[in-house]
Image (cartoon, rainbow, N blue to C red):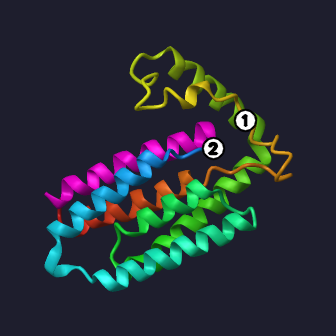
Amino acid sequence: MVSFCYLGFLTLSFFAALSDFMFYRIPNALIITILGGVGLKLFLEYPHTDYYFTALIFVITLLSGYLLYAFKVMGAGDAKFLSASILWLTPQDVPSYLVIVSIAGGILSICYIFWHHRIDSLRLNLIKNLKESSLFNQPWMFGTSLQIPFTSAGSDIAWSKTLIPYGVSIFTGSLILVSLYFTQRGL
């Protein structure tokens, strides 16, 4: 049953990363659903979970994320997504997860700095195709976000830098660690 929880987490994380990639927004509904899944996972793993240490890591991550948001290094949605994703890990996996997310974020940043025009073109085509799709145009999916004006990766005047959807690197770290979780258990 816990394996299905992890698959649900990866599915929700994928949609959070996709939303961040396309719109530079991660809907709070996705974050809340990811947090709700954590509650189910913790309930199913009850005797094997160190709740206090996990809660401490979550709070430290959330506060650190908002500090990065205050200095305009990371978006608020990315901070919430990272904090919610950390709850899916054992405390021992958190350092390696943060290293993986950092490396993926660095690679993503380099790609955006050098190829943001090409990436914007890809994003525009993806949004256009999603607008034509009846499934993704639903309010519960991306429907409301599809009405948001397009934001170019290199056009954020307020931040005066290239916008990076760190939700993609957070998903990458989650995918790698959950894959290792399944591999270690022979699933």
Q: Secondary structure at mark 1?
A: loop
Residue 170 counted in the magenta span: no
Residue 15 counted in the magenta span: yes
| Residue at the (35%, 45%) spot, across then down | 11
Q: Residues within 10 Å of mark 1 (few under 14, many from 20)?
A: some
Quarter placement of the C terminus: bottom left
Q: Which residue is mark 1?
A: 151
Determine whether 98 is above or below 126 in the image: below
Snapshot quadrant of residue 181: bottom left
153 relative to 107 in the view: left or right = right
Q: Secondary structure at mark 2?
A: loop
Front in this rendered view, residue 179 or 155: 155
The answer to whether mark 1 and mark 2 are in CB contact below 8 A is yes
Q: Residues within 10 Å of mark 2 (few under 14, many from 20)?
A: many
Stretch of the chain drawn in magenta: 1-24
| Residue at the (63%, 43%) spot, across then down | 24
Quarter placement of the N terminus: bottom left
| Residue at the (20%, 52%) spot, across then down | 4
Residue 116 spot, x, y in % from top left: 75, 41
| Residue at the (27%, 51%) spot, across then down | 7
Mark-to-mark CA distance, 1 and 2? 8 Å
Magenta segment main secondary structure: helix
133 relative to 145 in the view: left or right = left
Amino acid marked by disc 1: Thr
Of labels 1 and 2, earlier in sequence is 2
Front in this rendered view, residue 85 or 147: 147
Residue 38 spot, x, y in % from top left: 30, 63
Residue 89 spot, x, y in % from top left: 35, 71
Q: Which residue is mark 2?
A: 24
Amino acid marked by disc 2: Tyr
